[in-house]
Amino acid sequence: MDLIRIIFAILLPPLGVFLQVGFAGAFWLNILLTLLGYIPGIVHAVYIIAKR
């Protein structure tokens, strides 16, 4: 299941984080990072998925 979340995190970072944590603070932070730059959003999403 983590592989699917990581694929979603690469394609659409907030979706990958949402599947992992729901509407928690990490989700909103990831939306902000993705809006500021796509790469920071991907890095944050993969980090959130990998640490849990």
Image: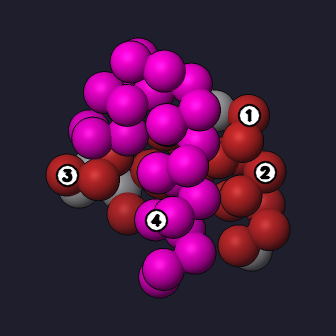
Relative to 10, residue 37 above or below = above
Q: Earlier in the sequence, mark 4 or mark 3?
A: 3
Q: Secondary structure at mark 2?
A: helix
Give the residue type at disc 2. Answer: Ile
How many circles with numbers are drawn on the protein?
A: 4
Q: CA distance from mark 2 to mark 1?
A: 6 Å
Secondary structure beneath dot 4 equals helix
On screen, 33 above or below 9?
above
Reading the image, the residue beneath label 4 is: 48
CB under 8 Å between discs 4 and 3: no
Q: Is residue 31 above or below residue 26?
A: above
- Are the residues tagged 2 and 1 within 8 Å (C-beta)? yes
Task: Name the residue carrying label 2.
Answer: 7
Residue 32 sits in quarter: top left
State the separation of the CA atoms marked 3 and 1: 20 Å
The structure residue drawn at horizontal position 59% and vertical position 32%, both measured from the top left corner, is 39
Determine the CA span between mark 3 and mark 2.
21 Å
Tell me which label, 3 or 1, sits earlier in the chain: 1
Q: CA distance from mark 4 to mark 3?
A: 11 Å
**Amino acid under label 3?**
Gly
Mark nearer the N terminus (3 vs 2): 2
- Mark 2 neighbour density, 10 Å: few (under 14) some (14–19) many (20 or more): some
Dot 4 amino acid type: Ile
Q: Is residue 25 left or right of residue 17?
A: left
The reply to whether residue 46 is in sight is yes
Q: Nearer the viewer, mark 4 or mark 3?
A: 4
Please state the extent of the stretch shown in magenta in the rendering: 28-52
Name the residue tied to disc 1: 11
Q: Nearer the viewer, residue 5 or 43?
A: 43
Q: Is residue 13 a member of the stretch shown in magenta?
A: no
> Which residue is label 3 attached to?
25
